[in-house]
Amino acid sequence: MLPWGRVGAYAREIARSDLFDRHFYRGTNPRMHPLSRLFPERHFVLKGEALGLRPNPDFCPRAYLRHNPDLTAKVRHPFQHYIRYGRHEQRVTKDLPPRHQTEQVPLPVLRPLAQKRRFAIVVHLYYHDMWDEFADAIKMSGVEADIYVTYVRFVEARTDLPDRVRRDFPQAVIHQVPNHGRDIFPFVHLVNSGALAGYEAVCKIHSKKSPHRDDGDAWRRHLVEGILSTQTAPRLQRFLDDPEAAFWVADGQVFSGADWWGSNAARARDLLRRVELPMAEQDLTFPAGSIYWLKPLMIDMIRGMRLRVHDFEPEQAQVDGTSAHAMERALGYLAQTAGQRCVQATDLDRRRTPAPRHRPRYVSAFYLPQFHPVPENDAWWGKGFTEWTNVARAEPAFAGHNQPVLPGELGHYDLRLTEVMAEQDALRRQAGIDAFCVYHYWFDGRRILETPIDQLCASEVDFPFYLCWANESWRRNWDGLSGEVLLDQSYGAGFAEALARNVAPYMQDRRYQRPDGQRPRFVIYRPDDMPDPARAVANMRATWRALGVGEVELGAVRFHLGRDEAVTEDLFDFWIEMPPHGLVGECDYLVGGPAAPDPHIPLAPGFKGLIYDYSRLAETATDPAYTATLPAQTIAGVMPSWDNTARRGSGAHIAHGATPASFSRWLDRIAQHRIEGSYRQELFVNAWNEWAERAMLEPTERYGDANIRALAAFRQGGGPRS
């Protein structure tokens, strides 16, 4: 061992050389003492070099001596020799794995299984000799799972791997894949295909030899045994029960802190931009080793990144700095945006008591009947215009902007078909929604967009609903406040009584909702627009009584109210909170507010709209200072997202970072802090199908039915983020 003074001198020489990669050294030696992590050069001098640990990805002390035999007898410190002489002499510094030529095959076409077990285990094999080790681990775990195997095949080698896999697991799904993107892209390809959708949890393992580590085999076994062992079954149940757990890894495999970035920060930022997620480098926490269990919400977020084969580099034995390495780190931010974390194996052996969460007794969602052509829209916007026309034309306002947002399984539907409403009802039940609050367009006796609800009432389709009078004038700029008036709400004499008579027949329909069990419910969108609101409300109530409807539970949307004393809090039975309206403050703006635009949002030329932080709105919604401003009888509201680019183009208002993960986190905050005090413990969602404002729960091409499942889990009490 070097004398103490020479230890310090050598460590300083290493530091001055700029050849020692602190991030890499810490990352590949996770069990170092905390003091050694502070001074990794000293650790390398005292222990690491003798153990053969690498000071950077491209230098192996033992390989340096092995490939340079003239140094073996006279050099005690190979890295010091390299710093002083070897780099100038261009000496060989490491062993490279044998460069086997792999078969160039197209990506396999994948199909989801018709029937699935509760769990899936995905295995990627570059080294075929590891299959037996993995098969034993899977069997030892006792978990009944669907097995997916992807593998790389070498040109010069014969393989019986598919036969071996099927001997162990006859129903396994096996696919040969190109050697591209390490183990990460084959997994992403499975995610993109939908093959991994519908599982309660998915396990991912791969044949990790880590040639840059002398303890590579021991490390891999530790990673696998941490998630597949005789303890897997009880730990897996605790993992599922923990609403704050996103990933489960072996002990010691949750890496935290900026020291672990290596050369991957810039690429990880680009990956996260695909799902509108910001990245604070100091907040890095991730499941290291790429061997873990993960929950469906994380599968949804990976799918949302829309990664394809060209997003990953060709395989060249890289040990850092690739999209695969960046993706490993980006996963931690996906968990964070959902308010979740990575847990280690022994964490699951300790029982946790999560914070109490209250579940809503009744859930409503605003419903837009705009998705069919009408003569008025033909005249104003062009023949055949529907809401889909604007949705399809939307263009992204910044890199990573989720536009256009296209429909998933329901397609570009036409609400003149009651079969569509039946399909929507099936999804409503899946989401745990009790009723649709359907917009009712009535202009002093003139109706528009009434066909869907009228045809519904003439059918047998199960579609629980109540009406909301959308009493704003229609204007060419879509906001109801300014621009050319297309259809005026004039509030002529006797309008309140006429409106009450118009909606009374709907209240007799068997599907019309009475949330309190007695009174039919009716909502007014802009109560302050009515002349003399108190008198109008009294006339409506009197008319309904005279018609035999009886008492009506009458509510109003809160967001448009100013300080108009004509609309008092007790005028209505309840109020509806309608995010994002009333929630956005000056500090929430990322673009267009008082502060300089966020430099991490690269805007398209000509953008003049507003962009604000979705996650901050979720925080405000549960801030006591904000909730104190709401009437006591307010129904708590939530929105999956908001972005009216389809209607306003470059002048859009956009909630940045709205994803199924951040929606789940908002739901969780509502469960902890708002539902108990909400009117009748209800929840209101804005909205079911406001596609042109990207405020919808319906399945999308990008995220599938992730928002529906998030709401369902929240409603069922299993934690919104399972």
Image (cartoon, helix red, strand yellow):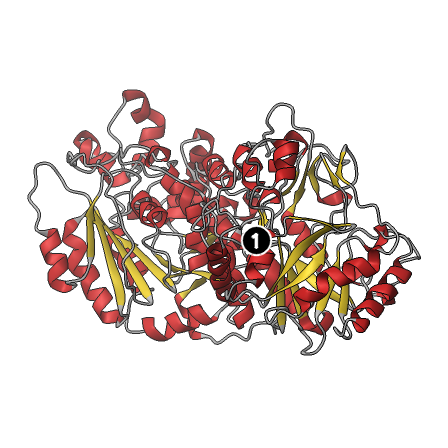
Could you say where residue 175 lies in the image, as x and y percent from the top left? 20, 48
Residue extending furthest right? 565
Which residue lies at the image location 52% right of the left edge and 67% below the top edge?
462
Tag 1, which secondary structure? helix
Q: Residue 651 falls in which quadrant of the image?
A: top right
Left or right, 363 with reference to 311 = right
Could you say where residue 652 lies in the image, as x and y percent from the top left? 66, 36
- Residue at mark 1: 662
Residue extending furthest top? 88
Q: Amino acid at mark 1?
A: Ser
Badge 1 crowding class, 10 Å Cα cut-off, few under 14, some 14 to 19, many 20 or more, is many
Could you say where residue 417 lies in the image, as x and y percent from the top left? 49, 52
Left or right, 165 with reference to 497 = left
Which residue lies at the image location 77% right of the left edge and 33% below the top edge?
483
Camera sees residue 466: yes
Question: Who is closer to the viewer here, 96 or 603?
Answer: 603
Which residue lies at the image location 61% right of the left edge and 23% below the top edge?
605
Q: Is residue 572 above or below residue 93?
A: below
Camera sees residue 4: no
Could you say where residue 322 lies in the image, as x and y percent from the top left? 37, 36
Q: Is residue 267 above or below residue 676?
A: above
Q: Is residue 63 above or below residue 494?
A: above
Count numbered badges in the picture: 1
Left or right, 304 with reference to 635 = left
Question: Who is closer to the viewer here, 184 or 12?
Answer: 184
Question: Who is closer to the viewer here, 359 or 668?
Answer: 359
Which residue lies at the image location 47% right of the left edge and 36% below the top edge?
12
